[in-house]
Image: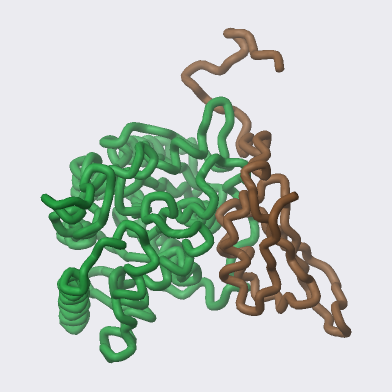
Chain colours: A green, B brown
Amino acid sequence: MKVVFKTVWDLPAEELFASGHRACAGCGPAIAMRWLTKVAGPNTIVVNATGCMEVTTTQYPETAWMVPYLHVAFENAAAAASGIEAAIKTLRRKGLWSGKTNVMVIAGDGGTYDIGLQSLSGMLERGHRVIYVLYDNEAYMNTGIQRSGSTPKYAWTTTTPVGKAIRGKIQRKKDIMGIVVAHRPPYAATASISNLVDLSNKLKTALEYTEEGPTFLHILAPCPPGWRYPEERTVEVARLAVETGYFPLWEYDHGKVRLNPPTSAIAADPKRRRPLKEFLKIQGRFAHLTDAEIEELEKDVVANLEYLAKLASL
Amino acid sequence: MSLPKVHEIPIGGIITEPGSSRRNPTGGWRSLKPVLHDDRCIRCRICWMYCPEGTIKEIKGEFVVKGKKYQYKYEIDYTYCKGCGICAHECPVKAIEMVPET
């Protein structure tokens, strides 16, 4: 990661994501969108898959976006971005365009983990110079909180109700970073809306590395109605996810895995990790968990951290 | 409100005006209103960073508060503020207070 922004005072002030969009009060993805557009700048073409951020920001005839914006379906956001990148390449060859244009895909977890996985994989394999940003709110939120491949184990959703037969989602959360890293892109990273300087630096780095090939950014963006917590705690929940080790911050940079603070400190000294219970207890979707189930989830978190620390030491 | 004629609408669902969602004042959603106490504010930029709506405005200039000089001042745009309270919750010095909307 290249450190472009050292402190919060280096962050760009210009707003390219207008107010008046219909996202819920306390929306985590909306914070992510503000910072994606701010850092990427006006010379960016956004390709947005269907999802919360498409539904709430572009209600015809209004749009919150102040950058060129294209809405496509769930499954082909990366494919459409590949086409845009190819068109820019052609314009450049013909001498009609010489500036740098970022092509940025913004997709939710449904559009990345489940429906758009094939087009993402294709884009990564063909090596288009596109940045793919996944904002992860861990379910299909805009249609009414249905489970997705990103929903963690034991989480309540409307399609994985808590009752006698099942206790929330049965399966684990998919390791999307593992899938992306397996394509060997120049750069892939995770970021959280609670650590905005880290997020901005990673985005800036990823945009620079698109000169070489596709890059990927996985952003955790909590959702107050879906995760069932009071809306003022969005940033707190995102921060706890990082500090409890539930969502480690790390990056894959040209074959080298690196853990970023505060995850690097947590992996080095397990005592600095906050208990997972702190993250789970403020969310209503985990309200039914027993101590044994929390312990099981905690074991998964610790195992994941150890796995990443091992990757980083290679 | 007069609706545009068919031939006046761009083809293909194109929206030609960027940032036109500003026509939609979302301030009416609010039940709690954030009030910023300028005398307690330490200018850390945290509320400005974490606002999902971008309603906290950073105003540059010379501001003297209680004998201290500051280069910035923060103001809340109540036209769009949805009253989520992230700013008040994240403020390290509790300079933002949530008061019921009257």
Whether B98 is drawn above or below A119: the answer is: below
Q: Is residue B32 visible?
A: yes
| Residue for point 36% across, 77% down | A243
**In the displayed structure image, the side of residue A28 where residue A175 appears, left or right:** left
The quarter of the picture where residue A46 lies is: top left
Q: Which residue occupies the foreground of this view, A80 or B3?
A: B3
| Residue for point 64% across, 56% down | A14
| Residue for point 64% across, 61% down | A13
Whether A198 is drawn above or below A223: the answer is: below
Whether A48 is drawn above or below A288: the answer is: above
Residue A232 at x, y = what percent? 53, 61
**In the displayed structure image, the side of residue A26 where residue A54 appears, left or right:** left
Residue positioned most to the front: A164
Q: Is residue A201 visible?
A: no
Q: Which residue occupies the foreground of this view, B25 or B13?
A: B25
Residue A174 at x, y = what percent? 18, 57
Residue positioned most to the left: A165
**In the displayed structure image, the side of residue B79 where residue A154 appears, left or right:** left
| Residue for point 29% across, 55% down | A213
Q: How many marks?
A: 0
Q: Which residue occupies the foreground of this view, B30 or A193?
A: B30
**In the displayed structure image, the side of residue B65 where residue B77 appears, left or right:** left
Question: Considering the image in quadrants, where does the N terminus of chain A appear?
Answer: bottom left
The quarter of the picture where residue B48 lies is: bottom right
Question: Considering the image in quadrants, where does the C terminus of chain A appear?
Answer: bottom left
Residue B69 at x, y = what percent? 83, 81
